[in-house]
Amino acid sequence: MARAWVYAEVTPDGPHPAALELLTHARSFDEAPAAIALGPGATAAATELGAYGAASVYASDDPVFAEHPGRPAAHVLAGLIEDEPTEVVLFAQTYDSRDVAGRLQGCTGSALMGNATSITDPRHARAEIFGGTKIVDVELAGPAPTLILLRPKSIVAEPTGGIARVVPLEADVLEEVRGARIVERHEEATSGPRLEDAKVVLAGGRGLGGPDAFAILDELANEIGGAAVGASRAAVDAGWVPYSYQIGQTGKTVKPEVYLAAGISGALQHIVGMKGAKRIVAINKDADAPLLAMADLGVVGDLFQVLPALMEEIRRRKGS
Amino acid sequence: MNVVVCAKLVPTGTPTLGPDHLVVRSGVDGTLDPGDEYGLELALQLTEQHGGDVTVVSMGPDEAGQALQRALAMGASRGVLVSDPSLRGADALVTARVLAAAIATTAFDLVVAGVESTDGYTGTVPVTVAELLGIASVTAVRRLEPSDTGARIERMTERGYDVYECPLPAVVTVTAGAVEPRYPSLKGIMQAKQKPVDRPSLQDLGVSDTTVTQIVTAVTDTPTKAGGEIVQGDEAVGRIADLLAEAKAI
């Protein structure tokens, strides 16, 4: 069995993009990592997981894993670890994978490291803390396997063109340990590119003053094309836009070509989610806003004047 | 419904690391983690509507008593503080073991925590506590109502939200913005001083293994990016458009 396992989140639409990144991380020290995929779509996802370097994919399509997130997956992983000891299990730093990892730690009593950005070997990894201002190298002790959560987009997933051996798993999850059950799912209606994939991200913060101002960002995104609208935690907490907009430590990590922040001061928790952007533009009335200092282009001004003027300018350039 | 709320003392402002690479917690100004106040508020509302008490549990240095005092002033009935020199630098697993053992000494229907701490951000401790207690859990909760089978819970997801039916007892983590935390009243602050705070020892709790499995071996500053250019309003529009064009976005 492989030294490294990757816990791959799957849906019927395919593996989570972060799973492919995890395989790329794993291949830096294990030529033939294994992936564990649980839930509807797992077997089908094996093709793509194999193409990104999984030598084997342990798969179960059992709906129990989708209906009861977290606990059943952790227990199946714990059982697998008993049967076939491994050195490290890699997880994506997402809400869902984090829950599986935390549960699994309760079973195995092994070390768990969150927010890692790279991994040297099963016992050594690196993380950024305090909003990415400091880098810590961490050594992990305790019983194997170590559990390491890697932040999405810390690495670019590289395909190998490989083919995975699929090992079907029997899900044997007792009723009493299934835990909470999903009875309804609600998805926000969205148009345009996903925040994580967009070439240009327009993000709004407290400076927008209310939910209505997000319409300006929507309109601008529409005018640019290939742009998505996001938000700081302050704007989400205020209820102006849904959580699915949130960029930051809690929320999504984005790495667009251009990141334009309007009315976002730049709390550490926000910077973690966007500092990988290629070009950063920040617009703020307050010349002392921390995000202005780290932006490639910091604009001290009123966003309610700058954004509409920018829209006009883009239209003018398109028209010429 | 009896609710246990997990509370963490976090440094006020940006945390700093000591020479041992651990977050400096003793002798610095600290406060109840703002992320914990949402869960506490939810717990207070639940007990106000459905009866029961709120117990606040914390692990930390003596200063963590300040975090407990704030929670008691907001309306919690009693506190439990686990403080022991051997817990300094405790990692997620040790923290979960201690909290699970402390929670197990109380009679509870629900355990509430923040989604992740404001200084550490690991975000796994609550579910590990649930696993150690052998109970259900739901994270990133924005709404919770008692139901016939336990609780009906809304959990935020990357694309919207899911509704759960959750048996009780259970552990939930509550997101910022789910409720509006109240400010402690003057009366609450006065009453808090009279409320009981238990201080069980690790021995009382039956926790013997406090071995840390995560050791920071080096800390370096992230190379700071050279600051860009600062421009004023009028000049800005053309420059932003240039930058978008340079990125081939327009």
Image (spheres, helix red, strand yellow):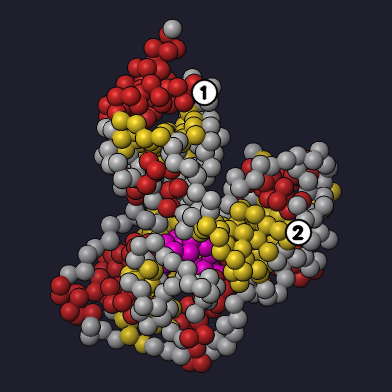
A144 vs B66, left or right, is right
The residue most toward the left is B187
Residue B192 point in image, percent of width and height: 23, 79
Label 2 packing within 10 angstroms: few (<14), some (14-19), many (20+): many
- Residue depicted at x 83% and y 42%: A163
Residue A4: numbered disc: 2
Whether residue A189 appears in magenta in the rendering, the answer is: no
**Chain identity of mark 2:** A
Write down the region rendered in magenta.
B112-128
The residue most toward the top is A320
- Residue depicted at x 75% and y 39%: A159
Q: Amino acid at mark 1?
A: Glu
Judged by depth in the image, the label closer to the viewer, 1 or 2, is 1
Q: Amino acid at mark 2?
A: Ala
Which quarter of the picture shows residue A161? Answer: top right
Q: How many numbered dots are placed on residues in this image?
A: 2
Label 1 packing within 10 angstroms: few (<14), some (14-19), many (20+): few
Residue A162 point in image, percent of width and height: 83, 42
